[in-house]
């Protein structure tokens, strides 16, 4: 059987315990909060990786991503080759007044062009100003935290392995390439016989 007034006594005990503790107030904005590494603050754009595949805009449940592009013709790399066309990004904007921060656009991007940034100070007095263009999204890219380190026993990512192999091939090709004319000292050249650094140059011995 419950004792009458026990609930009130428990509530007062909680109040007394709270009153004896020192209150902690975060002095924002002078002191910035310590955010978690995976904080969903704002979406940043690394436009060099964007191929205008439109996948993020199609999968967005709020339809808050606006993308414009045009096609350009790329000339053939070798003689007799075929010209190619590529998409060029003209506009990439996100309306954060509609965004619900689900992160679907970041997850479906196949080329790692979208990232979460912990930045959250982008409030505006006008709701129309919450549509941020690609220049603003690019500025937020530099606030994206570095990814956590891989496990020491983990396999090397295929992108890093491919880049490393390509760099090694380039360095090996440069090392095997013959020296360009003029790189080494030759007779008559600078520092060679008859050059400016040796006596007997033009005009010497003339009356």
Image (cartoon, rainbow, N blue to C red):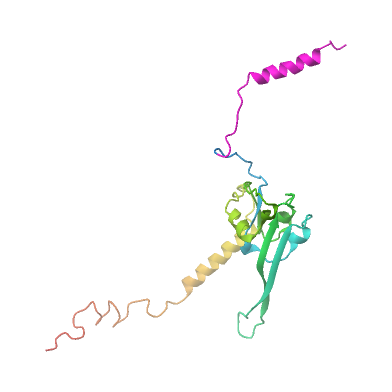
Q: Residue furthest left?
A: 207
- Using the image, determine if residue 40 lies above or below residue 73: above
In the image, 32 versus 81, the foreground residue is: 32
Residue 125 is covered by the magenta coloring: no
Total of numbered circles in the picture? 0
Tell me where residue 129 sits by quadrant.
bottom right
Q: Residue furthest right?
A: 1
Could you say where residue 54 lies in the image, as x and y percent from the top left? 73, 64
In the image, 59 versus 68, the foreground residue is: 68
Looking at the image, which residue is at 59% across and 63% down? 163
Could you say where residue 37 lies in the image, as x and y percent from the top left? 63, 44
Q: Residue furthest bottom?
A: 207
- Using the image, determine if residue 151 lies above or below residue 28: below
- Using the image, determine if residue 188 lies above or below residue 158: below
Residue 24 is covered by the magenta coloring: yes
In the image, 167 versus 65, the foreground residue is: 65
The span picked out in magenta is 1-29
Tell me where residue 112 sits by quadrant.
bottom right
Look at the image and tell me in which quarter the C terminus lies: bottom left
Look at the image and tell me in which quarter the N terminus lies: top right
- Using the image, determine if residue 79 lies above or below residue 19: below
In the image, 74 versus 177, the foreground residue is: 74
Looking at the image, which residue is at 61% across and 25% down? 23
Looking at the image, which residue is at 62% across and 41% down? 35
Tell me where residue 26 sits by quadrant.
top right
Could you say where residue 42 lies in the image, as x and y percent from the top left? 66, 50
């Amino acid at each position: 059987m419950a004792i009458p007034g026990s609930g009130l006594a428990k509530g007062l005990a909680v109040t007394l315990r709270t009153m004896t503790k020192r209150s902690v107030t975060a002095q924002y904005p002078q002191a910035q909060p310590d955010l978690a590494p995976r904080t969903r603050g704002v979406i940043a754009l690394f436009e060099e990786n964007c191929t205008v595949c439109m996948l993020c805009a199609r999968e967005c449940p709020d339809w808050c991503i606006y993308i414009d592009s045009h096609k350009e013709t790329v000339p053939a790399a070798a003689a007799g080759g075929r010209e190619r066309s590529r998409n060029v990004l003209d506009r990439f904007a996100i309306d954060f007044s509609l965004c619900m921060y689900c992160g679907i656009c970041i997850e479906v991007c196949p080329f790692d062009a979208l990232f979460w940034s912990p930045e959250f100070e982008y409030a505006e007095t006008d709701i129309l100003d919450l549509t941020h263009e690609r220049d603003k999204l690019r500025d937020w890219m530099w606030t994206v935290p570095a990814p956590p380190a891989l496990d020491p026993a983990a396999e090397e990512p295929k992108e890093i392995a491919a880049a490393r192999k390509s760099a090694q091939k380039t360095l090996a090709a440069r090392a095997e390439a013959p020296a360009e004319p003029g790189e080494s000292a030759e007779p008559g050249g600078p520092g060679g016989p008859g050059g400016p650094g040796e006596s007997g140059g033009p005009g010497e011995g003339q009356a």
